Image (cartoon, rainbow, N blue to C red):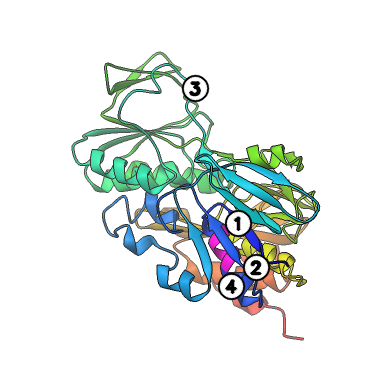
Amino acid sequence: MTDAGVLIVGASQAGAQLAGSLREFGATCPITLVGAEEHLPYQRPPLSKAFLSGQVDADSLLLRSADYYADQDIAVVTGEWIDRIDLDATGGCATSASGRTFDFDRLALTVGGTPRRLPVPGADLGNVFYLRDLADATALRASLDAAERVVVVGGGFVGLEAAAVANSLGKDVVVVEALDRLMARAVAPVVSQFYREAHERRGVRVLLDTGVVGLTGTSTVASVDLSDGTSLPADIVLVGIGLVAHTGLAEQLGLEVSSGGIVIDAHARTSRPGVVAAGDCTVLRSHEGLLRIESVANAIAQGRAAAATLAGIDDPLSAVPWFWSDQGEIKLQIAGLSVGYDDVVVRGEPDSEQFSALYYAADQLIAIDSVNTPRDYMAVRKILEKGGSVPRGAAADLEVQLKSFLPARV
């Protein structure tokens, strides 16, 4: 690497991991991490949980202190949105919206994404919130204090986490989901049904197969108009209907973009030599096809793989994907990818709020969803990491310890 060094565009979890891993792998070149927000890289998952409920403050969200970046000789530039990148044979130059330029030899895109907007009349009214960054969460937390009626549009992880927080604060909460079950893209029907019943037991109303056709009000939202002709009164509307990856820079550079993300391989390499990408802006090309995985674990793993590639080290993605969601006192832990499953074995009793769903494809265990059962989660995660399985017939037997199926060390 020459003196221009590595430019990391996007001060995200993946970006921070990439920068730190480069130093861990022995890279001595200049490293510059540029982010659009005014903050050092921070954790996003607590925004819809502990931060929204007031249990933690903004400072506690920081991934690393300013001293860490200084000690590692990593230049962190905040408040700069990169909107143009020019490449040449030896590197290139990035230009921010303010006109600031950054030269580089190697380039990493860890640009994340933005919440998908609700495409209905009235969506620009006041007190309509999206939850992606610290500014979003700060504004929502302030408005929750004065609100009584909260409508959450979207029954995915972020929406349900925020719904649980609002409900715990004594708000009247309604979740509106256009599909026929909650978290439909991520979990099996038995898990969806459990979460619907669990939220309803705690006082949250859940409306499935219901779309939003408009929001009404004067300066701020007053009601949510539904596809069945009814409406819901609302002081606050939180929209959580997915993430749109930032692919504009990738498209500008002629990188392969497909299925809503920048296409990378197991080494975090894009279609253009010398350019890597990691985190929520990517889709991974694998034997299952193109996979979009939005999670902290994925951002960390891809950030590390990208750093290895830039440092000339062979360290491809190998970890089993994992994820968690805290919805009130109910913790969901996921390990593995359930894509392509043909059977689900339930271990434990969902009504007890302690159970697991084990996913199988052709008799091979491929993933687990654990609800308040961390031992099941950890056992299966280790089994998957070692390439093992659990016999389908034994999975539901609570007398059988899942850890007994860990493959012997070689």
Which of pointers 2 and 1 lies earlier in the amino acid sequence?
1
Residue 215 x/y as whole percent:
37, 19
Taking the magenta stretch, the answer to whether it contains residue 258 is no
Which residue position holds label 3? Answer: 119
Which residue position holds label 4? Answer: 379
Q: CA distance from mark 3 to mark 2?
A: 47 Å
Q: Nearer the viewer, mark 1 or mark 3?
A: 1
Mark 3 Cα-neighbour bin, 10 Å: few <14, some 14–19, many ≥20 = few
Q: CA distance from mark 4 to mark 1?
A: 36 Å
Which circle marks residue 394 in the picture? 2
Q: CA distance from mark 2 to mark 4?
A: 14 Å
Which of pointers 4 and 3 lies earlier in the amino acid sequence?
3
Which residue position holds label 1? Answer: 8
Q: Are marks 4 and 1 in contact (CB under 8 Å)?
A: no
The residue positioned 42% from the left and 41% from the top of the image is 159
Segment tinted magenta in the rendering? 15-19
Q: Are marks 1 and 3 in contact (CB under 8 Å)?
A: no
Q: Which amino acid, by three-letter code, is at mark 1?
A: Ile
Residue 193 x/y as whole percent:
49, 43
Q: CA distance from mark 4 to mark 3?
A: 43 Å
